[in-house]
Amino acid sequence: MTTAHDDPSFVSPALEEAKRNKLMLGLFLPLQSGAWSPSLAPRETSWTFDYNAECTRRAEALGFDLVFGLAQWMGKGGYGGEMSFREFSTDPLMVTAGLAAITERIMLISTVHVLYGWHPLHLAKFGATIDNISGGRWGLNVVTGYKPSEFKMFGLDPIAHDARYSKADEFTTLMKRLWQDDDELTVAGDHWQLEGAYVAPKPINGRCILVNATSSDAGLDYAVKHSDLIFITSPAGADLNKACEALPAHNAKIKARGQAVGRDVRTIINPHVICRETEVEAWTQHQAILDGQDAVAADNFYATFAGGDQSSWKGTSRDQWVIGGNVHIVGTPEQVVEAFQRLHDAGCDGVQVNFYDFLPDLEYFGQRVVPLMQQAGLRL
Ligand SMILES: Cc1cc2nc3c(=O)[nH]c(=O)nc-3n(C[C@H](O)[C@H](O)[C@H](O)COP(=O)(O)O)c2cc1C
């Protein structure tokens, strides 16, 4: 299905404000029990709405540009182990609707698996609703689902990798038309039919912010056509030095593909940050997370990402999966900012950080790292 590559009428003030920074700053919300780390080392991190609402309020107060939540469909026990890693998770679309009502400035991005039985009209309506509640701050992270087990939960046959993106292309194209067209829409698509379909109110800025996460060719074709922000992973695993070697070419490729279709796309990577006053304290915490690992959960978590047909997340070792996230940044506030500078120099437009013990780690980050980012010119 073809569509205009750019939306000249779409200007999101929240996104434009974020882009004024050399490095956008996002928080990865811990909507899943255990968040990113299959470890039993002590922490208070919680999947509950109240905990995530507090993380979001604090992130907004500390000047973050966005919060983002992951979507997943796990069986009983999640990834298993003593902690039943990620068994509990709230739905990011529902959570962002709640967050929209209690925040004022921060962008709220929620992940939706658009191929699990959704109709574009549903998501166009629900998205426009959250967009209106939030005053134009809502964004959709379109995911196509890389786990056959999730398709089966919905009674669906898994779809081959590239076919997922062509189906998502039709879905997104129709959803955007429902947001943007003034008239009722009647379309017989390859996968969806609409007759006299219409959405009002429209999203405040013409359409909602669109995001996706990919590394593959088919995924990037989709991403540069539709997305404003692209979540990337290091092609060389979680080690910062190796990531910074591999990322310049990866980012350049994505930007060039965007420019080829007349679009200015921005990339965001998600580092796991362990920051303390001294380097020794930071590495001690890193070791404590590793030592506290729930071996069964870690094995299962690692196996999911090491296998599968997705291109993202490859090259990360099992131990790196115990810490979680993508690039690992461990050190003092000054070292964290230096690492961010390196990621920026490697072509990343933003960092979406995750932590181990979210609220205290976020607070410390806000007090100690954000001011240094400002001093370094990475943040306004
Ligand atoms: C930062 C980030 C967040 C993601 N969030 C989700 C998610 O919430 N749910 C999901 O099923 N997949 C998620 N994914 C996986 C992607 O949607 C996609 O399936 C994966 O990147 C593989 O795509 P690729 O083969 O095009 O690289 C995420 C990926 C990244 C990098």
Image: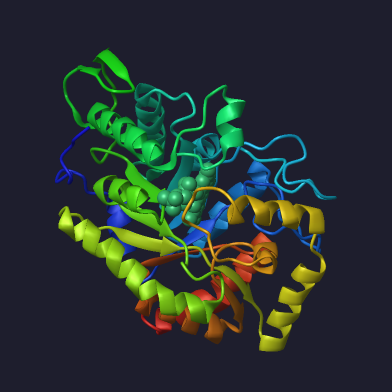
Left or right of 5? Residue 141 is right
- For the point 66% across and 80% down, the residue is 276
Judging depth in this view, the residue of 102 and 247 nearest the camera is 247
Tell me if residue 253 comes above or below residue 221 in the rendering: below
Percent across and percent down for residue 241 are 51, 82
Q: Is residue 278 at least partly visible in the picture?
A: no
Which residue appears farthest toward the right when viewing the image?
Answer: 82
Tell me if residue 13 comes above or below residue 208 in the rendering: below
The image quarter in which residue 148 lies? top right
- For the point 55% across and 30% down, the residue is 151
Left or right of 131? Residue 280 is right
The image quarter in which residue 198 lies? top left
Percent across and percent down for residue 129 are 39, 30
The image quarter in which residue 244 lies? bottom left
Tell me if residue 276 comes above or below residue 109 in the rendering: below
Q: Is residue 267 at least partly visible in the picture?
A: yes
- For the point 36% across and 36% down, the residue is 168
Judging depth in this view, the residue of 286 and 301 nearest the camera is 301
Percent across and percent down for residue 157 are 52, 27
Percent across and percent down for residue 232 are 43, 60
Which residue appears farthest toward the top when viewing the image?
Answer: 195
Left or right of 23? Residue 310 is right
Judging depth in this view, the residue of 32 and 165 nearest the camera is 165
Q: The N terminus lies in which quarter of the figure?
A: top left
Q: The C terminus lies in which quarter of the figure?
A: bottom left
Count of number-bearing discs: 0
**Display colour scheme:** rainbow
Judging depth in this view, the residue of 80 and 9 nearest the camera is 80
